Amino acid sequence: MSENTSDRQPEDVPATPPVPETPAAAAAQHTPPAGWHVPPRPAPPTPASGAPYPVGAGASFGSTGHPTQPTLPLGDGGRGYGETPAAAQGTAASIKRKSGAVRVAGLLVAAAVVGGAAGLGGAYAGVSLFQPASTATTATGPTSVTVNDTDDVNQTTAIAAKVVPSVVTIEAAGGAGSGTGSGVILSSDGYVVTNTHVVTLDGATGDAAIRVTTSDGRVFDAEIVGTDPLYDLAVIRLQDADGLTPIEFADSSDLNVGDETTAVGAPLGLSNTVTTGIVSALNRSIEIASSAAPDEGDADENQGEAPPFSFDFGQGQQSGQPAESIKIAVIQTDAAINPGNSGGALVDSQGRLIGVNVAIASAGGTSSTQGNIGVGFAIPSDIVQRVTDELIENGSATHGLLGANVQSSAYVDDADITGAYIAEVTAGGAAEAAGLRAGDIVTEFNGVPITDSVDLTAQVRALAAGSEVSLTYVRDGRDATADVTLGELEQ
């Protein structure tokens, strides 16, 4: 299968020793690597009342001096992210699916940024926005990985020491909105990947003022190199940066359910935060209503389904709701991911990037303490690498186009199998050229099971225009396969 990727690649990562099998022994025999800090005694605990205040630095740009807890805003769309919150709107959506399908209720999916939101694809779930106060706040964390007992260093500590220098905290401000997210360093001279919704304030602005803080406390202004709203990825470049530590990429197609994961980012503006978990599921797809998403025009359409919930920005009822949505393939993890983790790193047991954190699911409710419930999502590293290569080279990325209008087979009366039902093929499109026709139900795409239209669209969009793929579909009760050369989605 061929993909349109650029010739330019992020700078190669210098060779680093593997994570030790017995890190405690290794730590006892060797001096801790650069970036480790061994204090004379543990830091005193944060007072129980209120959020922690910044330590060791003044309030950074967009800050009010101390962070506020995220809330779930109530029922009004159109406000730029990072503005005054309210309660979550109503209850999460529930849908009825025929023949063994499930009813989903009480689930909210939010973009993991301090200001940003997302919706769960497939069986649609309610969408909510985690929102700070009127300006983004950043509580500065330790500028290194703290090790108090070098005789008892575990694997997670070793992973953190390797990965934390490659993750940054991003503050963006434009107009009346501002917010905080995370990013992952791609090259020593300042290329960083993050989410589009972080640097555009969910489409509210294309020229946000962006400031980036590295794990060692250096602060840089940054400019946008390119954004890809269809997969919620963006590349920025730090001005006059050098000597940065780029992340090492893993092959996300080699992942197994149950593999260990570590998330690194700045939840609630708390830089250099490390959490752990496992790969909970693979081949998952989510649908996100986004103001940053372009009008896809002649794109593959999803028919016969309720539209996804859209962003709520806590500014009173307004008519301006996001009209578009994006469908993306993701890794599901139970590593704690919270608002502010958007754009941060999800790494494997060797500290290699397996995904860029993008969204979380949260139980419904109006509590101001809503956050991680163990269901987080990250864009796989293979997709991240393709898209960022193209963004660095061209300022934009290409995406595949099947040339068919599809809907989930669960909504088709006479369908007796789960998949993406082709309602119509576009004349002269890729699907028609491959022999697909209306009534076919796609059940597999390049070996990935397809359970509904969101799955199919997410997989098609993950690939570059011109990619060659194999589809399995059902026609008249019989399985068949087709080789398809994807068209190019016009944006």
Image (cartoon, helix red, strand yellow):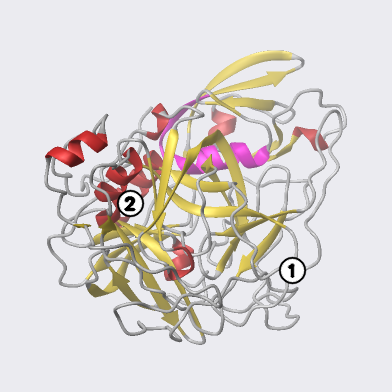
* Residue 460 inside the magenta-drawn segment: yes
Residue 252 spot, x, y in % from top left? 40, 34
Instruction: Find residue 59 and report its image quarter.
Output: bottom left
SS category of the residue bearing label 1 = loop
Q: Reply above or below: 347 against 76.
A: above
Circle on res. 236: none
Instruction: Find residue 194 and report its image quarter.
Output: bottom left
Which residue range is magenta in the image? 453-470
Q: Reply above or below: 24 against 180.
A: above
Please state which of residues 60 and 418 is positioned toward the viewer in this rendering: 60
Residue at position x 38%, y 69% in the image: 44
Residue beneath label 1, please?
A: 366
Residue 118 spot, x, y in % from top left? 61, 58
Q: Amino acid at mark 2?
A: Thr
Q: Amino acid at mark 1?
A: Thr
Residue at position x 54%, y 72% in the image: 48
Could you classify mark 1 by the number of other residues whose Cα lies within 10 Å: few (under 14), some (14-19), or many (20 or more)? some
Q: Reply above or below: 262 against 473.
A: below
**Mark 2 or mark 1, earlier in chain:** 1
Q: Reply above or below: 468 against 424.
A: above
Residue 351 spot, x, y in % from top left? 30, 41
Instruction: Find residue 347 and report its image quarter.
Output: top left
Circle on res. 388: 2
State the CA–CA distance, disc 2 to disc 1: 37 Å
Residue 470 spot, x, y in % from top left? 50, 23
Q: Nearer the viewer, mark 2 or mark 1?
A: 1
Residue at position x 47%, y 77% in the image: 205
Please state which of residues 414 and 344 is positioned toward the viewer in this rendering: 344
Residue at position x 76%, y 14% in the image: 477
- Tags 2 and 1 in contact by the CB under 8 Å rule? no
SS category of the residue bearing label 2 = helix
